[in-house]
Image (cartoon, rainbow, N blue to C red):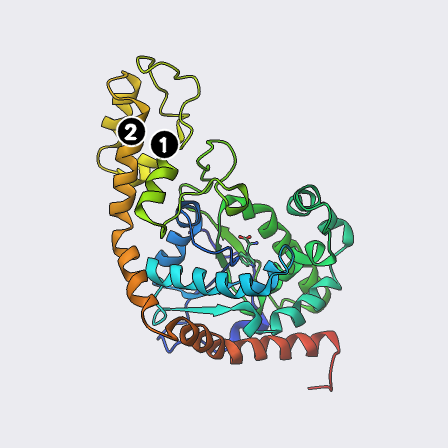
Amino acid sequence: MTSPSGSAASLQALPPLRRDPAPLERVFSGVQPSGLPHVGNYLGAFRNYIAMQDGHDAIYCIVDYHALTSTHDGEAIRRNTHEMALGLLALGLDPERAVLFRQSDRPEHLELMWLFASVTPVTWVERTPSFKDKKRSQPDDINHALLTYPILQAADIAVYNARYVPVGKDQAAHLELAREIVRAFNTRYGDIFVEPQAVFTDSPIVRGTDGGAKMSKSQGNTIDIFGDEADIRKQVMGMVTDTQRIKRTDPGRPEVCNVCQLHRFFSPTDYETIWDGERTARTGCVDTKRLLSERMLDFFAEARERRRELEARPGYVEDVLQAGAARLAPVAAETMRICYDAAGLGPRA
Ligand code: TRP
């Protein structure tokens, strides 16, 4: 873990989330309600969510406000929010140790976003890579919220004055912008917020089954964690391997083969043997993929079982989300009080 990068003078007094003897460093992350979590979500970020719930004040959020920038299907947002929360809980997010909540249950995020918007130059958001990508991928819906997206993301983190933000590498630019926005706010109003730092896993970029683009729902190149076994096997068997290995007898190159790279994680004790089989053409791509699908199903067996258990408990997910938002209410209220006071909004304190 890296050392602190800023001070949090005025917000040090935020109510602690739990009564630990010493205050813990705060962690925040958000995930879009894109439906079922996939292997890229897990390797890139969720395993850090779970690891960081110990020893930190960890807060995790399903960002449904952010989802509005790309979908206006209300039913889908609600269903996918539930599904993502259920998946996280099944993967080991423990509501006793961390807070899980739905962004739209804490509208202070939007209030703080407005204050942040007022110190963010338009040029900063216009040049954000994700905005440029969206202009290309949804040319008929370049809505204003897309431009404001990273400002809301900065506010998400700052409402709780979080220092560490576990995310995939694709979020690096958003985190850099969040730091700049917080710095701009602090410059104007005093040292109110700590500058948040991204925390990456050792596999911060996970390529999809096409072997090229990062694994993401919108690319249609995911390996699902909670899908049917047959579907997961099909996704793995359809993976692109080393494109230069054409004949079965050609030697493979594990360094470039996405299947071999995933074995590094899912076969931690014998991936080198697996790689060696590829290099010497002792094994074929099909063997290596079949083994990967077995290893993945083993790895996620417990989570898949837990998801089935939790799914059978009516109202459980909703209760967790609402309890999470309620626990955060005093923290969010205190942040807004400090910020309104500094910005001259509302009656003088
Ligand atoms: N933009 C993030 C993503 O697509 C989601 C997100 C929203 C987020 N707010 C956040 C991540 C705050 C970290 C912190 O993955």
Q: Residue at x 40, y 43 (%)?
A: 223
> Is label 1 in a helix, a strand or a loop?
helix
Count of numbered marks: 2
Depicted 198 relative to depicted 72: above or below: above
Q: Quadrant of residue 183?
A: bottom right
Query: Between residues 340 and 275, which one lies in front from this camera angle?
Result: 275
Q: Is residue 53 visible?
A: no
x and y, in percent, of residue 148 in the image: 70, 58
The crowd level at tag 1 (other Cα within 10 Å; few <14, some 14-19, many 20+) is many
Q: Quadrant of residue 49?
A: bottom left
Name the disc covering residue 12, or none: none
Q: Which residue is mark 2?
A: 288
Left or right position of 106 against 89: right
Q: Is mark 2 within 8 Å of ligand 1?
A: no
Please say if the residues under marks 2 and 1 sit with CB atoms less than 8 Å apart.
yes
Q: Which residue is mark 1?
A: 259
Q: Residue at x 41, y 76 (%)?
A: 319
Ligand 1, what quadrant? bottom right
